[in-house]
Amino acid sequence: MIEHPVVVIGAGPQGLAAAAHLTERGQDVVVLERGTTASTAVREWGRVRLFSAWPELTDSAARRLLEPSGWSAPVSGYPTGAEWVDGYLAPLAEVLGERVRYGLTVTGVARQGRDKVVDGDRGARPFVVHTRDAAGGEGRVHARAVIDASGTWSLPNPAGADGYPAVGEVASAPHISYRIPDDVSAFAGAHVVVVGAGHSATHAALRLSGLVRRQPGTRVTWVLRRGGTANVFGGGAGDELPERAALGSRAQKVVENGAVDVVTGFRVSEFRQQRDALTIVSDDGRELTDVSHVFALTGFRPDVDLLRELRTNLDPALEAVAGIAAEIDPNIHSCGSVSATGARQLAQPEQGLFIVGAKSYGRAPTFLALTGFEQVRSVAAHLAGDHAAAERNELELPATGVCGGAGGFDATEGGCCGTPAVLQIGARPVAVG
């Protein structure tokens, strides 16, 4: 199959880095991107500032590929998503040139002439990557190996606490958003609810808190599924990512000064529409009333159907690559101690298939760009036959000072990595009902 290229799905940070490493090693590579430009998903959250600094956001092979063009790596500062694209990802895609093909959505991957069930001669058959262009035209690209770096951005989790949309969630779609808001001015004087405990929800709560200060009558309620606020505000001084620590500290302040109300242990089960407002009902019967808009920011999930005709090994809970699932399980920890990042841990039963980047984490949070860059470095070395380089672990992660596990889903305090010194929140009682 040497006549076929390695196909990379997605021209995001990890997909482009994979192409850079493969190019540097003299391997034929094709990157398939659904958008019309590089890193379409990153552009969609372009106004959000990253809490990784510039040196942690560029890949080593990509830098070596870019530098002869006159590009120089930014050495300090925390870019927004748009600045990341304009300052690094778009130039990288430009240098990769015709290796990156735009406007092609990958609809599935299979072995040529073999569905998932067939064993015979399976490993000797090339992959067939099925595509669809913007006009609906179908295509096929043959590959000797496939690196799935498609991410999870296209599949946000619902507000419903059991993993499916809550009753009435689909019908209430005009009142629910699943992305961080850019402009919140339209919600002046309204009651807005944020659902979620991660960094996206924190960003949204902070933006809306500014509207509360500027526009009297605006209310913001922050809904947490867990029984307490442990880990919501980050690791404080224990977090070696200063911008992430600062994000948590700012969120804690707006809660303490009453700009944002917090409701804990609230698992959304139903949305009821009443004229132009919603009532949100939890599984224990509590209600949030007169809600104009909801930002459901409860994380993302991978597109597992994309690889349904291939043999994969995914963790049954996280839908993450099984080889790294134990180290990233948010029920246990996510303390910046991940070491299983190489080709060996990422390999699938389908020889030549690798899932990398945010998609390798499945539904688990806390993925860092540095982790993805190390993943694709190792995978590219493996595909080039440099197994010694593939086995090396060159990853050095900053300590996070936070973790997903909180001792128990209903726990009000605690967690595997400790908690911030100040846990008291709310300057006034939360109005529920």
Image: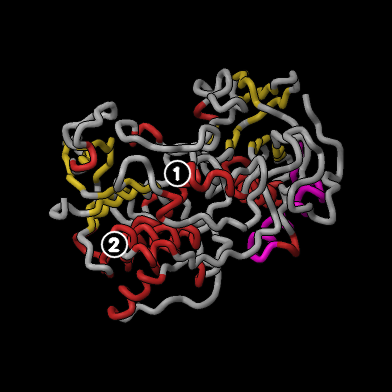
Q: Which mark is residue 41?
A: none
Type of the residue with mark 1: Trp
Secondary element under disc 1, as helix, strand or loop, is loop
With 423 as the anchor, is 143 left or right in this view? Answer: left
Q: Earlier in the sequence, mark 2 or mark 1?
A: 1
> 74 or 208, which is in the foreground?
74
Disc 1 target residue: 153
Instruction: Please say whether residue 240 is one of the residues in the magenta stretch.
Output: yes
x%, y% of residue 339? 55, 58
Q: Residue at x 62, y 58 (%)?
A: 336
User: Is residue 133 at all visible to an observer of this figure?
Assistant: no
- Note whether residue 116 is visible: yes
Residue at 74% x, 42% y is 406
Residue at mark 2 to residue at mark 1: CA–CA distance: 32 Å
Q: Is residue 250 above or below residue 300?
A: below
Answer with the quarter of the image where residue 350 lies: top left
- Residue at 66 percent of width and 23 percent of height: 279
Dots 2, 1 in contact, CB < 8 A: no
| Disc number placed over residue 385 in the picture, else none | 2
Which-is-in-front pick, marks 2 and 1? 2
Hey, which quadrant is residue 414 in on the image? Answer: top right
Which residues lie in the magenta part? Answer: 239-264
Question: Compared to 14, does 309 lie above or below?
Answer: above
70 relative to 364 in the view: left or right: left
Under tag 2, what secondary structure? loop
Picture quarter with the C terminus:
top right
Q: Looking at the picture, which amino acid does disc 2 mark?
A: Gly
Could you classify mark 1 by the number of other residues whose Cα lies within 10 Å: few (under 14), some (14-19), or many (20 or more)? Answer: some
Residue with the most extreme left position: 3
The percent position of residue 288, horizontal first and vertical second, equals 72, 27
